Image: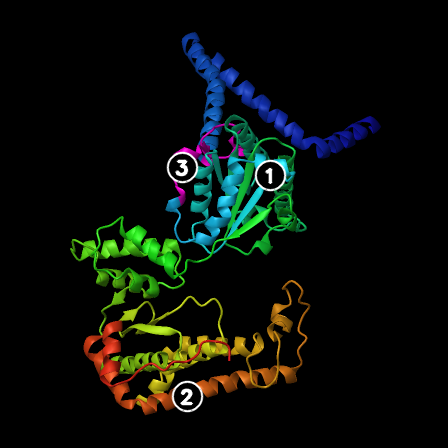
Amino acid sequence: MKNTLNFSKKFRLFWQLNWVKVVVVLVLLFSLLLPAIILSMIDSYQRLYIVALLSIFPIEAILSAGAFVFLYSYFFFGRGGFGNLTKMGGGAAKGKDIGVKWDDVIGMNEAKIEAWEVVQLLKDRTKVSLIGGKIMRGLLLVGPPGCGKTYLAKAIATESGVPFLAASGSEFVMIFVGTGPARVRSLFSQARAMATQHGGCIIFVDEIDAVGRTRTGDLGFGGQSEHNNTVNQLLIELDGLNSQESNILVIGAMNADEDVLDAALLRPGRFDRKIYVALPGLEDREKLFKFYMAKVKADPSIDIGRLARRSVQKSPADIENLIKEAALIAARNEHLLITFKDLSEAFERIEMGFKQHRKMVEEERRATAYHETGHLLAMYFLCPTDDVFKASIYMRRSSLGVVYGVPREDYQNKTRDMFMADIKTSLGGYVAEKLKCPSTSAGVGTDFRYAMMAAHNMVWRYGMGTGGLIGDYEFLTGSWAFRKGATGDHLSDRVKEKLNEETHKILQQCLEEVEALLRKEDVLFERFKDELMQKNELEYDEIEAIFAEYGKQRPIISAQPS
């Protein structure tokens, strides 16, 4: 009896510890024995047929798995099949095949002067070597989007005649661990081979901030560590160029501020030189218009200078897009040539959106005409730097109307007078509704936001208030606590209250000046309202003609610091 109890206890213990294994073994035995028993019960011919068919399944499974892996690698990671995870997608192009000549680069004369020195160094590095200096290894192109940084890099490759290896910063950011550093090694290995063969090579990394941003600690998911490893590999490869005889230049381009890059990338010996590609000035914009207009059929009487003056703060890409949009409008209107009207409509469509010819209630239409007339008069008389190019009461996007002004000159900085003029222009619509309509409308919301932000920045950031508080107080507030160098809110409630009072004082002063202007120019006010009600839109020439009819001339207001 004792042995039986011991056996049952052992069996239960064994079953508790190994029941999963036992079940698996039984299922496997059943799955093997059952087919064998069934096969023994059928005739020999059918049995041979089934055994032959089953023997092919392993081979089919292996072939299917191989095809899946190959197709997954090919379509997901690009051409190259197996091993493509660590390889870059693009190949090297010879300088002569790129086809971007130096004269084709328009709108960046100062950047071209600096870049030409790079071309000379790539062509003849012996000059620097004889003096004892080191060849430049890194060049950083920084500037707003659409200004031609990639175009300039291609022109450098074309003029120097060396191969051009292009990559994007996002190509080094991968989901698989280790692929980012491996791709960096692959890119530089390919560049060294091309430089050995052709006497030099250019590596161009567009949007380099995607791969070269500052290294930080990992938050626990591994992604930051992978990024840090990629940056480390990039630093190692750049250092390795100094010990190589090959003539390799790494060009990085980015739209963001250079401060986002890791400090180690910016030290001497890596990205040795920075070229800032800025928006084109007036002369450069004229050249750009001539260049792109030559590619289309346009009316030769078009005033290129007027177009250039109207396109202040436009990039080369913006100007090219403008010409393309004008060509589409001309084709839609069945014009044989692009006219100035087509270009003007293209400006409006890009800047303000499509016209919407929806019908408005007459009272709302009249209120909109008064609102836009208020903006127009305030901009004409009180804004020293802008020209009124258009006034419209057609609906565009979420706006019921618009007054379109363009700066006369390429100002690089804003003075107190400019800020005040912008605020007065913004408040013109509200004051007009207040004076001429039964009540003001919600259409002043956007104007208020802009005016209040401008006044706030004047007082809180630029020391333009009248109460004697000087400094960037915005930097010391709690909302900026996560900025580099900021440590939290250091302003007392008394100081904040005083700053807000000064902000309100600026708004009140501008409001009073605009109201005085509109009351004084009531005749012009009504005339422009009637013109807008009748025509819906007024162009620059029509606006100037009405002012001339009443003997009005824009006052000369200094835009210099007061």
Judge by depth and name the residue closer to the eye, 223 or 40: 223
User: Which span is picked out in magenta?
Assistant: 76-102
Circle 2 residue: 513
Q: Does the magenta stretch include residue 290?
A: no
Q: Which residue is drawn at 72% across and 35% down?
A: 16
The circle on residue 72 is none
Question: Mark 3 and mark 2: span between their CA atoms?
Answer: 58 Å
Q: Is residue 204 visible?
A: no
Q: Quadrant of the N terminus?
A: top right
Q: Does the magenta stretch include residue 79?
A: yes
Q: Name the residue under label 1.
A: 128
Q: In this view, does 316 lie above or below 25?
A: below
Indicate the quadrant where residue 325 lies: bottom left
Callout 2 secondary element: helix
Q: In this view, does 89 lie to the left or right of 17?
A: left
Q: Residue 103 in the image: state x and y as whole percent.
A: 38, 45
Q: Residues within 10 Å of mark 3 (few under 14, many from 20)?
A: some
Mark 3 or mark 2: name the one nearer the start of the chain. Answer: 3
Instruction: Where is residue 479? Give x, y as percent.
Output: 60, 70
Left or right? Give the position of 42 relative to 251.
left
Mark 1 vs 3, N-terminal side: 3
Q: Is residue 280 or residue 204 the one in the foreground?
A: 280
Examine the rendered structure and indicate whether residue 238 appears above or below residue 141: above
**Location of residue 25 in the rendering, given as x and y in whole percent from the top left corner:** 63, 25
Instruction: Say which amino acid is labelled 1.
Output: Val
**Residue at the spot x=34%, y=70% of the render?**
398
Q: Which of marks 2 and 1 is nearer the N terminus?
A: 1
Could you tell me the amino acid type at mark 2?
A: Glu
**Residue designated by label 3:** 98
Q: Is residue 247 above or below residue 111?
A: above
The amino acid sitting under disc 3 is Ile
